[in-house]
């Protein structure tokens, strides 16, 4: 039985790269796969299909900083982490 499998991730290499081997194995097994992430990282998961959604990583980090004043790329405090998810 073949399935349609959607992998979803923020558009960050550290989040996407662990999923790539799983997606490739699923595709080799005959399943239809795609990634739900921002289109700016399509080259990272190629040749998998990308269903573009959400903001770029830079846009998301800028929004966290605008709302909290914290740099979410360096401040991993619980309050900043909660705001960035």
Image (cartoon, helix red, strand yellow):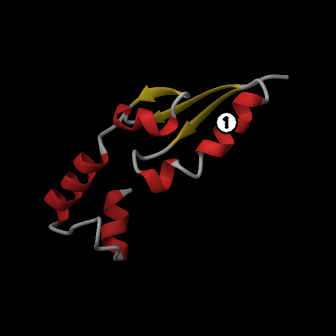
**Residue 37 makes an appearance in the image:** no
Horizontal and vertical percent for residue 3? Answer: 74, 25
**Tag 1's secondary structure?**
helix
Instruction: Classify 79 as above or below 30.
Output: below
Viewer-proximal residue, 36 or 44? Answer: 44
Crowding around mark 1 (Cα neighbors within 10 Å: few <14, some 14 to 19, many 20+) is some
What residue is rendered at 58% in x and 52% in y? 18
Horizontal and vertical percent for residue 75? Answer: 29, 74
What residue is rendered at 34% in x and 77% in y? 77
Viewer-proximal residue, 48 or 78? Answer: 48
Instruction: Classify 21 as above or below 82.
Output: above
Residue bearing the label numbered 1: 24
What residue is rendered at 52% in x and 33% in y? 35
Q: Residue furthest right?
A: 1
Horizontal and vertical percent for residue 82? Answer: 37, 64
Residue 52 falls left or right of residue 70: right
Number of residue marks? 1
Residue 2 falls left or right of residue 44: right
What residue is rendered at 37% in x and 74% in y? 78
| Quadrant in the picture for residue 5 | top right
Q: Residue furthest bottom?
A: 77
Horizontal and vertical percent for residue 23? Answer: 65, 37
Instruction: Classify 17 as above or below 3.
Output: below
**Residue 68 makes an appearance in the image:** yes
Image quarter in which the N terminus is found? top right
Image quarter in which the C terminus is found? bottom left
């Amino acid at each position: 039985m073949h399935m349609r499998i959607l992998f979803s991730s923020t558009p960050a290499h550290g989040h996407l790269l662990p999923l790539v081997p799983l997606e490739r194995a699923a595709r080799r097994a005959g399943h239809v796969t795609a990634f739900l992430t921002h289109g700016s990282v399509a080259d990272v998961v190629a040749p998998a299909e990308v269903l573009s959604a959400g903001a770029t990583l830079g846009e998301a980090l800028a929004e966290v900083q605008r709302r909290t004043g914290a740099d979410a790329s360096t401040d991993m405090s619980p309050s900043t982490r909660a705001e960035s998810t």
